[in-house]
Image: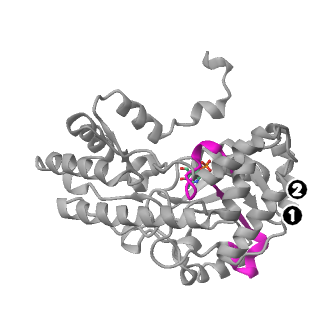
Amino acid sequence: MSQYLNEKIKGIKPSGIRKFSEMASSVPGVISLGVGEPDFITPWHICEEAIYAIESGRTYYTPNLGLPELRKEICNYYQRRFGCNYDWKKQCLVTVGASEAIDICMRTLLNPGDEVILLSPCYVAYTPSVELADGVVKYVNLKEEEHFKLTPEALEEAITPKTKMLFLNFPSNPTGGIMTHDDYVKLIPIIKKHNLVVLSDEIYAELTYDGTFCSLASFEEIKDQVIILNGFSKAYAMTGWRLGYILAHPDIIQAMIKIHQYTIMCPSIISQYAGIEAAKNGDEDCKMHRESFLARRNFIVNNLNRIGLTCHMPQGAFYVFPSIEKTGLTSEEFCEKLLFEAKVAVVPGNAFGESGEGHVRISYAYSIDLIKEALSRIEKFLKQF
Ligand SMILES: Cc1ncc(COP(=O)(O)O)c(C=O)c1O
């Protein structure tokens, strides 16, 4: 049937995470530390608001931008937590997860041939979303010895006359790296000088462990150039509700609406009512989740280093990105062998870009007991090397 398919689609590779999860599901007794999803269930007070919306017959379409009350609460939240001001009437668009947000940003902003700087390794959806919008990806390879941060030198070097966009994601999936306020300060003159539009995927903002999270939107001098992507999936354990948002200049939001209104119309109203409660009264839930992930992070990093998989200390998100170079295997070979011999599923680093080679991504959004059992299997497995 390939004659019916769009040429661009034929060139898009399937996600390396999905490929490994599918392989893992065929192995009985496997422990999967592959998927980036909190193991908590959504806090009950948030669920109750959704149930109440159904009970009271609020089951219709909402405005394309999203429910006004939700947009107000999202803007209140960004102000309260990160000190960034946005006008809920003009600068906030509610999306179906950060995933829709990524897609419509690309389709709204890119012209064919525009270059987009991605930091490698990066979240698996970034490259295809650029390519589907006819953009050209330019990678900046982040280095473990620099704690997977973007340096001004590396950014400057990647910029060409065709560069339009810089796409950031801190805390990062898959490395757990963060950028502090001082790290960002060094990038601001470059972003200004080259007039870049910067997407900042801040979906792991609440899961920052060491230091405080700094939103790129807090830099007033580039705020018009910054587009914030965020969502409820990770911090509130709401992956299945499919709720995210974009904060940006009113002109950009107006342009994005043209795509969103025809393809999505609006996210589920039931999820939007849950989102109001999360944004308004969910700070304590985020804190509880953060503290729990922090304990798991410390446990897994200490133990991985002890058993010989050297691993930098991730400062955010819920992933560790240890080096497997000592084993002499590629990341795919390592993951396949680990899966079939030790029955533990993790994701090969090269699923996140070539510079992820030599590493694997392990999610610690699982119970300590499960992590303990997985680590003991990995320890036995490593004895052969
Ligand atoms: C960096 C990053 N951005 C976006 C997403 C997608 O999130 P959502 O569930 O809001 O679509 C993920 C999910 O894993 C992610 O890791």
Work out which residue is located at the far left of the displayed protein and give it: 384
- Residue sitting nearer the eye, 167 or 64: 64
Circle on res. 254: 2
Q: Residue at x 50, y 39 (%)?
A: 15
Cβ–Cβ under 8 Å for marks 2 and 1: yes
The magenta-colored residue range is: 217-243
x, y (%) of residue 216? Answer: 65, 73
Provide the residue designation for mark 1.
Answer: 250
Q: Is residue 239 magenta?
A: yes
Q: Is residue 21 magenta?
A: no
Give the residue type that dot 1 points to.
Answer: Pro
x, y (%) of residue 165? Answer: 68, 62
The answer for how far apart the CA atoms under marks 2 and 1 are is 6 Å
- Residue 90's quadrant in the figure? bottom right
Q: Is residue 316 visible?
A: yes
Q: Residue at x 59, y 76 (%)?
A: 214
- Residue sitting nearer the eye, 285 or 385: 285
Q: Secondary structure at mark 2?
A: helix
